[in-house]
Image (cartoon, helix red, strand yellow):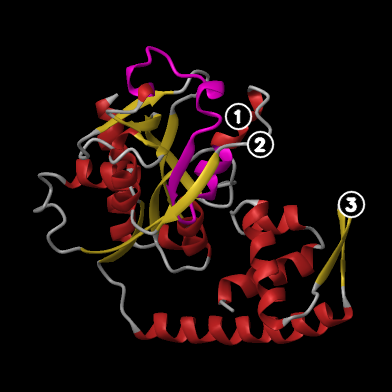
Amino acid sequence: MTLQQLKYYCAVYECRSITKAARKNFVTQPAVTAAIRELEKEYAVRLIDKDGKYIRITRAGDRFYEYASQMLTHAQEFDDQVQDMVSHSRSLRLGLTKSAGSSVYMEYLSGRSEEYSDMEFKLTVGSTSELLEGLWERKLDAALILNHGNVSIDNFEWAELRTTEMLYCVSVIHPLARANRLTVPMIANEKMVSTKHDDCKTEALKQLFLQYGCEAGPQVIWQFDQQSTAMKMVAFNLATGYFPADGIRQYDGIVGKLLEGDKPIPICAVWTKDAWKQEHVQQFIKGIVKFYEAAQ
């Protein structure tokens, strides 16, 4: 049992909808469904029953919600007290996606060490959905994310910095490495590797598959914590992958191909209204937005 699983269940209970709960938590529906299944499996109890498009909370689910909501309240109180204890003056809690977010962060800060010499950057690397959740829970001040368009960022302040291309990645010895063009039907049966919690990226690829009538979606067989492990699987021709162009440049033995029908993905700076009240957060956001406006 994790606090995240409890949070997803409480959202389903309150919204009476898996779809609305997923939207509220900036994750995909499968992520919420999987969390509830894990809770039901761990405690050997049925929490919800599905009836077509509708769900019904069981009697055990009602009691479970009471305990879960109490635990989440205590956890939030604990977090608030610790946050109050720690001073965040001139300390920027910044979230970065594994490749694209980290790339724009390094592009911007390169040669700017003096400008930010009095600021401490506390970096958190994660998926888009994880970082948006961190912003919502006030654990982050800002984040640099990939915006695939399948989770809402309208509850935050945000600005597009630049775009990147999503590339289908294969080993240099894979037959597809020599293809002049790449379409979804050509990769429909390929075994793929990804990083954990990258539901937004996988869902975006699934939608591209659906456009070509491939209802089964991408065959993501393996998921790893570290992107470097996933890229080694690709380089050794054990799997294929789907990653931002920014994330594959430093890896040898890999060819990235643009999928026909795919579109550039915006890389965005996202922050909360509360964080914007801090002068050093404004300094960073205004600086990075101006940097990429000048580069266009």
The residue most toward the top is 180
Q: Confirm or deny contact between disc 2 and disc 3 (CB under 8 A).
A: no
> Residue 261, image x and y in percent?
53, 19
Point 33% across, 82% down: residue: 86
Dot 1 alpha-carbon crowd within 10 angstroms: few under 14, some 14 to 19, many 20 or more: many
Q: Which residue is mark 3?
A: 52
Tell whether position 203 is magenta: yes
The front one of 264 and 111 is: 264
Point 39% across, 30% down: residue: 167
User: Is 94 rendered above or below residue 176?
Assistant: below
On the picture, is 53 further left or further right than 78? right
- Image depth: mark 2 or mark 3 in front: 2
On the picture, is 201 further left or further right than 65? left
Tell whether position 197 is magenta: yes
Residue type, label 2: Ala
Give the structural element (helix, strand or loop) at label 3: loop
User: Is 225 rendered above or below residue 44?
Assistant: above
Q: Confirm or deny contact between disc 1 and disc 2 (CB under 8 A).
A: yes
Q: Which residue is mark 2?
A: 216
Residue type, label 3: Gly
Residue type, label 1: Phe
Point 36% across, 86% down: residue: 85
Q: Which residue is mark 1?
A: 209
Q: Quadrant of the C terminus?
A: top left
Which stretch appears magenta? 176-204
User: Is 136 rendered above or below residue 114?
Assistant: below
Choose the circle earlier in sequence order: 1 or 3. Answer: 3
